[in-house]
Image: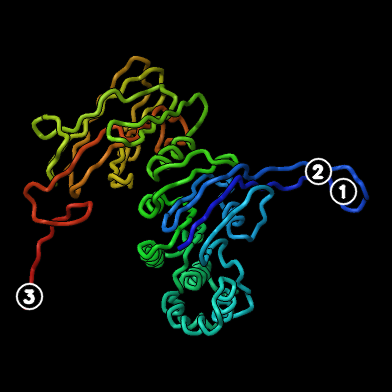
Amino acid sequence: MGSIRVNKLGKAYKQYDNRWSRLAEWVLPGSKIRHRLKWVLQDISFQLAAGEAVGIIGMNGAGKSTLLKMITGTSHPTTGSVIMTGRIAALLELGMGFHPDFTGRQNAYMAGQLIGLGVDEITALMPAIESFADIGEYIDQPVRVYSSGMQMRLAFSVATAKRPDILIVDEALSVGDAYFQHKSFDRIREFQKLGTTLLIVSHDRAAIQSICDRAILLDHGGIAKQGSPEEVMDYYNAIIADRENSSLDQVVTAEGRVQTTSGTGEATVTEIVLEDEQGNPLEVVNVGTQVTLRIRVKLNADVPRLVLGYMIKDRLGQQMFGTNTHHMEAPLESLKAGDTVEYAFNFPLNMGPGSYSITTALTSSDTHLAHNYEWRDLAFLFIVMNMNRKVFVGTSWLEPTVEITR
């Protein structure tokens, strides 16, 4: 079983005014310090228990890859320490450690030895590596002729040929085709069930929320947030919006979940109701019921353009469906402070049984990255039950008919 303990980890690079300052600091005895430190990461502390899965998220340049390199030992920290137990397999930069002039098979032997496998062990595992990578005759071609997807296939196949105690994965999986991504995540989930500790960096919200027990948000070189994947992803979603004149609040709801609200407040949702066809409010809904989602909005300032979006999420915060009035070609123009607007979205609720939430967004365009008037997660909660449909599993109700010929 593997575990990771990161204690006050920091990474800084020396910056010099010019190359002569660097040379003088190196060669002149007793020379004064001529550099300044540029901190990429500072005071990073967390731990992963055996079998735990943790996702690392953050904007580009937040230090995610640097953190993984220090944890795996490919980069030395300036401050702090990392203590790990168990056998580690890491998939960091795409093709890292591959020699372009060697064949895929030769690189598989070299990469396998770098993660602690013996030559005989790699030979025994090679048929499984070839099968999982599924690159055919290219296994005996130089890696320089590989596409990025083929390099990722081979690298992942080697790194996971034998179940590690700790698996560390950077965003390399994002370059693969959809089929291989599914296959890779299936293998990761299988390792999880067997007790592998997982540390993964990804911008894929669904992957983080479906795989990880916990998430860590890096921002400006430090840990901005730790918690459940849903809570941290909602917070991250809020901070990447336009920060000018914006507020960001998180509160714990009566159900024990963390609700995130952000925005300038120039427009706000005042009421959300889910109704049946007779206009009766609903909190528990039968599978496939025709419903109306009614959302009332108040304008607190003059707004040149208003777009309302909503997202339905499952209990883990994974996105089930979302749209907005920009994509529906129904934005509103030139609204004044004090105006109120009521939206009514009509649709059949073809969802599987479970607990769901609705997120609302008031913006000026198709995203909340500029003019984020209000973004509210967990704005409304409801439950879907199967009261009279045939038994089925999943998050969608897609009732089929069947014709059988013998």
Name the element at disc 1.
Answer: helix
The answer for how far apart the CA atoms under marks 3 and 1 are is 84 Å
Nearer-N-terminus badge (2/1): 1
| Tag 1: amino acid | Glu
Question: Where is mark 1, residue-wise?
Answer: 25
User: Which quadrant does the C terminus fall into?
Assistant: bottom left
* Cβ atoms under marks 2 and 3 closer than 8 Å: no
Question: Where is mark 2, residue-wise?
Answer: 35
Nearer-N-terminus badge (3/1): 1
Nearer-N-terminus badge (2/3): 2
| Residue 361, visible in the rendered structure | no
Q: Give the foreground label among 3 and 1.
A: 1
- Residue 399 lies, in percent from the top left, at 13, 56
Name the element at disc 3.
Answer: loop
Residue drawn 29% across the image and 23% down it: 270
Q: Is residue 175 above or below residue 275?
A: below
Q: Which mark is residue 405?
A: 3
The answer for how far apart the CA atoms under marks 2 and 3 are is 80 Å
Count neighbours of disc 2 (C-alpha within 10 A) and say few if under 14, some if 14 to 19, many if 20 or more. some
Residue toward you, 322 or 55: 55
Q: Is residue 37 above or below residue 93?
A: above
Count neighbours of disc 1 (C-alpha within 10 A) and say few if under 14, some if 14 to 19, many if 20 or more. some
- Residue 133 lies, in percent from the top left, at 45, 74
User: Which quadrant does the N terminus fall into?
Assistant: bottom left
Q: Is residue 285 above or below residue 130?
A: above
| Tag 3: amino acid | Thr
* Cβ atoms under marks 2 and 1 closer than 8 Å: yes
| Tag 2: amino acid | His
Name the element at disc 2.
Answer: strand
